[in-house]
Image (spheres, helix red, strand yellow):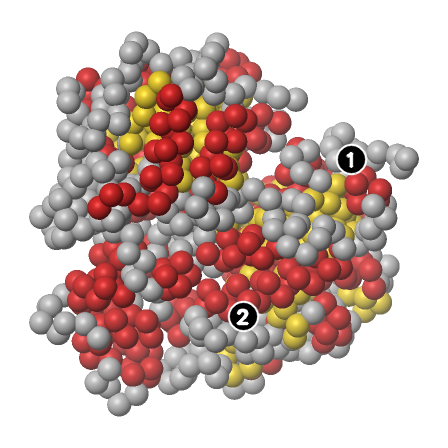
Amino acid sequence: MSQSIKDHRGRPVVAITGIGVVTSLGQGLQDNWAALTAGRSGIHRISRFPITHLRTTIAGTIDFVKNERGTAPALTLATGELAAEEAIAMAGLGTPGDFPGPLFTAIPPVEMEWPRRRALYDSANPDIPDAYDRMIDVACRTNDDFEYRSTLYGYVAESLADRFGTKGAPISLTTACASGATAIQLGVEAIRRGDSDAALCVGTDCSVTAEAVIRFSLLSALSNANETPEAASKPFSKDRDGFVIAEGAAALVLENYDTARARGAEILGVVRGAAETADDFHRTRSKPDGSAIIKVIRDTIDDAGIEMEQIDYINAHGTSTPENDRMEAMSLDAVLGSHLKEIPISSNKSMIGHTLTAAGAIEAAFSVQTIRTGRIPPTINYKIPDPTIELDVVPNQARDANVSVILSNSFGFGGQNACLIITAEPA
Amino acid sequence: MEREVWITGIGLTSSLGEGLEAHWQAMGLADPPKPIIDTATMPPFAFHPMVPLDLDKQIPRRADQRQMEPWQRIGTYTAGLALDDAGLVGDAERLAQTHMVVAAGAGERDMAVDGEILQNVSKAPSPDEFLNERLGSDLRPTLFLAQLPNLLAGNISIVHKVTGSSRTLLGEEISGVSAVEIAWRRIRSGQGDIFIVGGASIAGRKDMVLQRAIGGTVWAGDPISVWARPDKGGGTILGSVAAFLVLESREHAEKRGKKPYARLSGVVSGQSRRRPGDARETAAQQFDTLGVTGAAPAAVLSGATGMADATREEQDLLAALIAEGRVTTVRGVANMLGSGIEATFPSLVALGALALSRGGFFGPVDETGFETKQAGVPGRIATTTWGIWRGEGLGLVEPAG
């Protein structure tokens, strides 16, 4: 019998045994990793809908996954399924349609979309003056089960649970742009509690619609560097002007390290630490002193039971907004001090854009791959350094390095901060 | 480590009023209890409207109020009531350790903007371009944040300074169960000492009725008991409900000298595929798991929505449990509050804790006769919540100590 391994607090160790990724760079871990380490961008001109009158006309949409329904929830589900399928196959856990653990899924908010709204309105009784009364009148006679179910918040996770046979009520969650990390954190907690020996954690977000682009534009969050789409996302650069909205999904199979070893699974990495804080300062901005971000980084290091000097790479949140990159650099500096200059830090978002709800999960998957391959993906488009941000951002070219302890950051609107420490095995 | 989970703070607002006393008056003491239902505003759809709240009392800054849509306001307000009730207001140190799990819906539309656009979009030479132009100029920038699900939690952090952590669960009725369950599991196992957990849902919104009407899930016509609806096609009557609970470990509560309303002794959730009999089977196992037996029977606060198949199955199960002596009687709480979706389960746990703390139970509100008077004080109260589409959950509330 193999020996039981516990972490520094006597908790079960959480192994990662399967990962799956879909981004604008392609489908599957191998293709994504090849593109990412080649410094290729997945950002392009939007072709899904007309871009006239839009301030931002670029995105990292996923246009190669079949979406017959043409709606955001349908694509979010299809992309999430591809990621989960890859992760479960890699883990070799359970049997098809019978995954032995719970599902935690980060999803974007969903609602009825304009084509449906218009179809209802245009087919309704024109004598009803109020637009919503008019649509409701016809909706009552329509009984469109797919439209109903797919605009429920539970739809994506329930459908994933049906497909993969996860156990218990599936969890759908959002912590805005930290959601992917939160999904992993929920899985880590379930395994540490001993509730389950395995968990399927998914972040999936394919919600780039005209209205979504407009909403983020109205908050001045998006880059308007439309001329050269692949150069628009430039985290930590002086001329960064916002994030590039994008789509993607990642899935991670988490397992109790002991049971994973006992069944002979390959351990891809370990989620050694996780923490979160809520900021009470503002709906879209961090506390100016960075205290909430500083605390979440410290708590994560503490939860992992490591010394901060052991961190040898940081997978940045690095959105390319003026605010985020400044606050992230400042807070890292406050925690890591002079050691920070020795740690390479790069932003996957320079290439795949900001995949919003999925970002934390995708970046965790890429962190695992960084450890496995000993290759750090670059921060591309780093042409004009921001003199106020003194970081080794792995500019423009991937770098070979022995990496065994990674800090992965995720921060979101609504004061959401979540970090993970991902390490090589053995724990 | 298996620690006891105590309910030490409750915030509850609905059509019946604000706070526990108002709900005890309306549901526990009134004979018979009478729901507050608005049938005039949105015919043929009835709904339970939120009682007017003096928002300034819990959300003092008007600037904060303006940043929220109504569902966020009632949620933030009610979370404040719960924190107040738990004695946490102004306790910066504890609030910084308090974790938050919110079950959220959201998606409020600017219906005036939508209406204007719909009137003209199909006549435009390029409807998609017209849409881009109008949305870009007509949408309020703040609306996006006011309709984002995780911004209820965000506003609770900003207004009430809860900063331990913040998670928002989605998924309609079952998300309310999962939110309470996750907090319960974390406290029980030592992954946190004190939580605020709950949800808020506002009825009378046409955007929400539209989404639900397309699935044929809205009850049209005069309100009748949830137990009477399955034979007439079934359907839900929505209610404005916000419910937040402060849950903490017994040790944590005792250390700060806080008396509990009740103990939350268990929460379980499941997902059946909803073939005929599936949900009943899942829920029957849940009653076994939580140990509701003939020797220790429970009164049931049911979240039954009035949807035909699910309500009929739940009623059959509850009737069987009554016949076995495991359940004393049942209250379909939607008859009094309406269906509060994400807020349903937290509100049932809140009402269960209220009844136990007052040493009584709620009167029947049901013309079918399924609900009977509770003889004496229930020893324990079970709370059921089945989603309209998916998800089955059960909680158990018992006297503390």
Q: CA distance from mark 1 to mark 2?
A: 36 Å
The reply, left or right, for residue B340 in relation to residue A28 is left
Q: Residue furthest right?
A: A1
Marked residue nearer the N-terminal end (1 or 2): 1
Kind of residue at disc 2: Ala
Q: Nearer the viewer, residue B18 or A260?
A: A260
Q: Give the answer, above or below, for where A414 lies relative to A151.
A: above
The answer for which chain carries disc 1 is A
Chain letter for the residue marked with disc 2 in the picture:
A
**Residue under the image location 48 percent in, 67 percent down:** A74
The label on residue A7 is 1
Residue at horizontal 35%, vertical 69%? A113
Q: Which residue is mark 2?
A: A246
Place of residue B252 in the rendered image (x, y in percent of width and height, measured from the top left): 53, 19
Q: Amino acid at mark 1?
A: Asp
Mark 1 Cα shell of 10 Å, populated few (<14), some (14-19), many (≥20): some
Name above or below for residue A401 compared with residue A298: below
* Residue pictured at 42% horizontal, 81% vertical: A49
Residue pictured at 51% horizontal, 83% vertical: A45
**Where does the C terminus of chain A fall, quadrant-wise?**
top right
